[in-house]
Amino acid sequence: APAPNAYRESAVLTATPEQLVVMLYDGANRFLTQSAIAMRDGRAGLAGEKLRRAEAIIDELLATLDMSVGEIAERLQALYLFFKEHLMSARLKQDAGKVDEVARFMRELRSSWAAVAGA
């Protein structure tokens, strides 16, 4: 349906930086959840594809970190890099539990950001 798409685009265009981060977390979480389900179903190809999409979002989060804000940015950078390592390991071992762990962290981070963003 075109309407939700147009709505999403305008939501992205009018979002604050904090709200954009929340949207990225939501996207990553969705792909991680889909990946874990596919892994448990033994669908490695689909699991890998969803994992790649989540990893692309984590790369985007890393790329847009403002390191000038100091400690918080450094902590987030360390977390995101940890997520990437964890997901690489999940892919190698087809370990859905590891994917779930990253998704859980993402949801916790999302709550914090949503509080900041007022979303």
Image: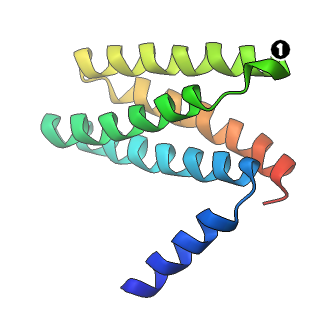
Q: Quadrant of the N terminus?
A: bottom left
Tell me: 57 left or right of 61. left
Q: Residue at x 69, y 44 (%)?
A: 110
- Where residue 92 sits, quadrant-wise, is top left
As helix, strand or loop, the secondary structure at mark 1 comes to helix
Judging depth in this view, the residue of 34 and 13 nearest the camera is 13
Compared to residue 80, the image places residue 34 above or below, namely: below
| Residue 5 at x, y percent in the picture | 45, 76
Q: How many marks?
A: 1
| Residue 117 at x, y percent in the picture | 81, 52
Compared to residue 42, the image places residue 90 above or below, namely: above
**Residue that carries the numbered disc 1 in the rendered image:** 71
| Residue 38 at x, y percent in the picture | 24, 43
User: Looking at the picture, which amino acid does disc 1 mark?
Assistant: Glu
Tell me: 32 left or right of 42. right
Tell me: 20 left or right of 87. right
- Where residue 47 sits, quadrant-wise, is top left
Compared to residue 18, the image places residue 5 above or below, namely: below
Q: Residue at x 27, y 22 (%)?
A: 91
Q: Residues within 10 Å of mark 1 (few under 14, many from 20)?
A: few
| Residue 72 at x, y percent in the picture | 81, 21
Compared to residue 91, the image places residue 118 above or below, namely: below
- Where residue 50 sits, quadrant-wise, is top left
Judging depth in this view, the residue of 117 and 89 nearest the camera is 117
- Colour scheme in the image? rainbow
Q: Residue at x 58, y 44 (%)?
A: 25
Q: Quadrant of the C terminus?
A: bottom right
Judging depth in this view, the residue of 72 and 35 nearest the camera is 72
